[in-house]
């Protein structure tokens, strides 16, 4: 019988990262009296967003980071949200601003993201931060790709020369993930809904990142034996179970290492949001070298 893949414990890695950030916050506070501050803006009542935001608030508090959630009603206008963002931009105690997506239909998300001070854009979605990442001068990197990279780097001493296939080309996950892998010297293919022979493309990969948004989409026989699989997907099945974009039961028998869902990339995403807030704190104070 084939050996089982190593299961990458994102929960433990995220806890370790949060503990490290917590220690750094305590040291900053002792030395300067300052505490990094994360502000999340939540518009409306989207249940999944509410869960994410509560979790961000709780984990920030646990590590001693200042955090606030600004809850605005679903009928908030774009002008009102832009005014809230402007107020947070102007507030020096605010290091990180995150506007939880999705936003209600009357609000143009791009316009709101463009309005966030790039130095406080802890999601890394502002055009300035997108450009910085593309040109290899990133400060604030989108949290999910950053978390995925941290897991990969813990697992593999070097990614240089590996064939990496990223399935999905969103601005939030697929594209920044591909850029990070390229910067780590992988040979990168970005696959998407128009890719021909996706199973054949994935079979070439030493490293697969699935960010598709389709439950159990990537099958075990698409995976090259021994490959590393990072499953970004979070999908809820009709029976209530949370599953990834990869058919874990099949892939675990073929891969060399694989992230589970839940307990893989998800916890790292939030830990990286906290890390980005600390990075923004240092960078805003001209202390970018430590970030
Ligand atoms: P998007 O819907 O923005 O992007 C999905 C991508 O998958 C698109 O590029 C799309 O291609 C591609 N795709 C869709 N169908 C196929 C197909 N049949 N074959 C190949 N490619 C396909 O999703 P996101 O990037 O925002 O998120 C992806 C997944 O990651 C979701 O499950 C989401 O819930 C999860 N997620 C998890 C996070 C975490 O913390 N773990 C954070 C963010 C997202 P095309 O561009 O051609 O349409």
Image (cartoon, rainbow, N blue to C red):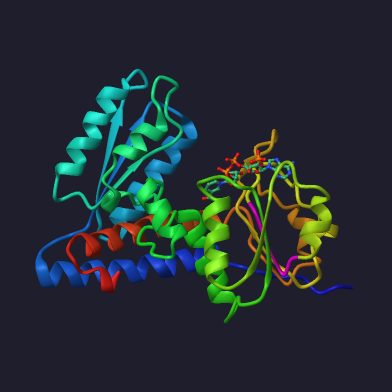
Above or below for 15 versus 270: below
Task: Kindly identify the residue that appears in the image at 84 percent across and 57 percent down.
Answer: 200
Of residues 209 and 55, which is closer to you in this image? 209
Residue 42: x and y, percent?
A: 35, 34
Q: In the rendered structure, which segment of residues is drawn in magenta? A: 205-210
Inspect this view and state whether residue 283 appears.
Answer: yes
Q: Is residue 263 magenta?
A: no
Residue 71: x and y, percent?
A: 30, 31
Above or below for 267 versus 212: below
Give the dominant element type of the magenta stretch: helix, strand or loop: strand
Left or right? Give the position of 276 relative to 230: left
Task: Kindly identify the residue that appears in the image at 53 percent across and 60 percent down.
Answer: 179
Residue 70: x and y, percent?
A: 27, 35
Q: Looking at the rendering, which quadrant does residue 111 occupy? A: top left
Left or right? Give the position of 176 relative to 59: right
**Quadrant where ligand 1 appears:** top right
Which quadrant of the figure contains the N terminus?
bottom right
Residue 95: x and y, percent?
A: 23, 53
Which quadrant of the figure contains the C terminus?
bottom left
Q: Looking at the rendering, which quadrant does residue 184 occupy? A: bottom right
Left or right? Give the position of 18 relative to 290: right
């Amino acid at each position: 019988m084939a050996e089982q893949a190593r299961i990458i414990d994102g929960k433990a890695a995220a806890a370790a990262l949060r503990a490290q950030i917590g220690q750094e916050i305590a040291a900053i506070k002792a030395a300067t009296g300052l505490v990094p501050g994360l502000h999340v803006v939540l518009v409306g009542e989207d249940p999944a967003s509410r869960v994410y935001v509560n979790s961000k608030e709780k984990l920030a508090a646990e590590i001693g980071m200042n955090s606030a959630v600004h809850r605005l009603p679903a009928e908030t206008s774009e002008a009102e949200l832009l005014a809230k963002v402007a107020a947070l931009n102007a507030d020096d105690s605010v290091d990180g601003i995150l506007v939880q997506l999705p936003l209600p239909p009357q609000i143009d998300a791009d316009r709101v993201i463009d309005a966030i001070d790039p130095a406080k854009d802890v999601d890394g979605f502002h055009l300035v931060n997108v450009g910085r990442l593309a040109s290899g001068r990133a400060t604030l990197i989108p949290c999910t790709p950053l978390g995925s990279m941290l897991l990969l780097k813990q697992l593999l001493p070097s990614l240089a020369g590996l064939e990496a296939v990223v399935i999905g080309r969103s601005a939030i996950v697929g594209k920044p993930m591909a850029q990070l892998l390229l910067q780590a010297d992988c040979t990168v293919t970005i696959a998407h809904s128009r890719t021909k022979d996706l199973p054949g493309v994935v079979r070439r990969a030493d490293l697969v990142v699935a960010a598709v948004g389709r439950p159990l989409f990537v099958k075990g026989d698409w995976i090259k034996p021994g490959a590393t699989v990072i499953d970004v997907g979070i999908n809820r099945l009709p029976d209530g179970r949370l599953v990834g974009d990869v058919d874990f039961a099949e892939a675990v028998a073929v891969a060399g290492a694989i992230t589970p869902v839940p307990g893989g990339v998800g916890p790292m995403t939030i830990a990286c949001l906290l890390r980005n807030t600390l990075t923004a704190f240092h960078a805003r104070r001209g202390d970018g070298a430590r970030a």
